Amino acid sequence: MWTIESAARVSQQDLSDNYVFQRSLLAYHFAAGIVRGNLLEIGTGNGYGVSIVAPKVESFITVDKKEPHTGLWKEGNVEFHRMKVPPLRRIASSSFDYVICFQVIEHIGRDFLLLEEIYRVLRPGGSLIISTPNIEKTIVCNPWHLREYTVDEFSNLLESYFSHVEPMGVFGNEKVLGYYEKNRQSVKRILRYDILRLHA
């Protein structure tokens, strides 16, 4: 039997990933300015965010369905748990001050259940810091994404569980926006020949 693992892994080694990688790093740096206490990360990926947020918290549990090729969680206050989510198995209710979840929810079929589980493991007054692509900025279908949201759709989804939602965005400078526009136009020209919509 053949199985295909759905995972989009951003690498700092691949130059073509640099734009997405830098955007992902920005989320970790933003979180590092806020988090404290006990932290849960859903979606370790390659583990490049661990060293950014771990020094800011007392304990840090990070989970992913695949173990990253790094030993960062073996040091100090970091613990790695291999699991496919949702649910968050063996994670106690009301045990985290913060949960971070970057570029993960678009891969999850049961997005409501993921948020329900995050709400369950957060302590009263705890906070979720979460990121996902904005479909209005998507150039072409990502084969790993089960869905993408508009800002309003994502805010409404989050408001089903959280009383205060503050949408934010990541925007590039003129150079980045110029790169984005050239890329968008290039993809648009190529997709004219995809009459069977094979890219989807």
Image: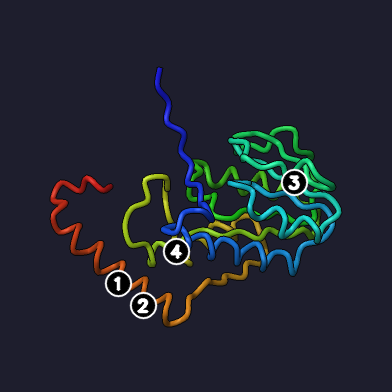
Q: Are marks 1 and 2 in contact (CB under 8 Å)?
A: yes
Foreground mark, 4 or 1, reads: 1
Foreground pick, 105 / 69: 69
Q: Residue at x 79, y 39 (%)?
A: 92
Q: Are marks 4 and 3 in contact (CB under 8 Å)?
A: no
Q: In the rendered view, would you say 102 is above or below 29?
A: above
- The residue where tag 2 is placed is 178
- The residue where tag 1 is placed is 182
Instruction: Give x and y (percent) for residue 186.
Output: 24, 65
**Marks 2/3: CA distance?**
41 Å
Q: Residues within 10 Å of mark 2 (few under 14, many from 20)?
A: few
- The quarter of the picture where residue 138 lies is bottom left
Q: In the rendered view, would you say 41 is above or below 90?
A: below
Foreground mark, 2 or 3, reads: 2
Q: Residue at x 66, y 60 (%)?
A: 129
**Marks 1/2: CA distance?**
6 Å
Residue 153, can we see it?
no
Residue 134 tag number: 4
